[in-house]
C-alpha cells in the first residue's frame, strides 16, 4: 500500500471499504470454493483455490489483530481475554 501526502484517515478507510466490497463481490460470484483463483504476479505454477485464499485471509486477519492487541497492551497496559 502506498500512501501519499493527500491521504487522510477518511480516504484510507474509504479505499479499504471499497476493497472489501470488491472482494465480497468476487467471493459471492464463486460457485465452487475448489476452483483455482487468479494468481498474483510472480507466482507462476502456484495454484490456489478460493477456499485456500479465504482460509489464508482469516489467518492473516487473526495475525494482524494479534499484533494490534500487543501494541494496545503496550500503550495502555490492559490485557485482553
Image (cartoon, rainbow, N blue to C red):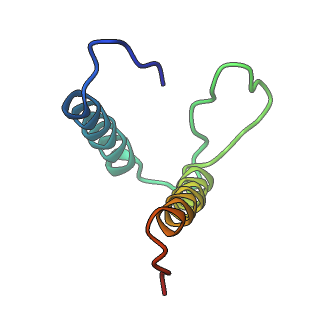
Furthest residue toward right: 45
Would you say 69 lies left or right of 22 here? right
Could you tell me how many numbered marks the image carries? 0
Q: In terms of depth relative to the viewer, which is nearer, 9 or 72?
A: 72
Q: Is residue 13 above or below residue 75?
A: above
Residue 73 pos. (x, y %): 51, 69
Question: What residue is shown at x 74% (from left), y 26% (from top)?
Answer: 43
Q: Is residue 22 above or below residue 40?
A: below
Furthest residue toward top: 5
Residue 64 pos. (x, y %): 54, 55
Q: In terms of depth relative to the viewer, which is nearer, 36 or 12?
A: 12
Residue 71 pos. (x, y %): 53, 59
Q: In terms of depth relative to the viewer, which is nearer, 76 or 30?
A: 76
**Residue 74 quadrant:** bottom right
Question: What residue is shown at x 51% (from left), y 57% (from top)?
Answer: 61
Question: What residue is shown at x 29% (from left), y 31% (from top)?
Answer: 12
Residue 23 pos. (x, y %): 37, 41
Question: What residue is shown at x 58% (from left), y 50% (from top)?
Answer: 53
Furthest residue toward bottom: 81
Would you say 14 lies left or right of 54 here? left
Amino acid at each position: 500500500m502506498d500512501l501519499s501526502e493527500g491521504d487522510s484517515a477518511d480516504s484510507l478507510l474509504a479505499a479499504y471499504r471499497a476493497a472489501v466490497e470488491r472482494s465480497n463481490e468476487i467471493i459471492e460470484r464463486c460457485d465452487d470454493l475448489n476452483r483455482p483463483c487468479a494468481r498474483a504476479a510472480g507466482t507462476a505454477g502456484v495454484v490456489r483455490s478460493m477456499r485456500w485464499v479465504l482460509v489464508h485471509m482469516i489467518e492473516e486477519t487473526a495475525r494482524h489483530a494479534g499484533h494490534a492487541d500487543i501494541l494496545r497492551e503496550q500503550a495502555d497496559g490492559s490485557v485482553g481475554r
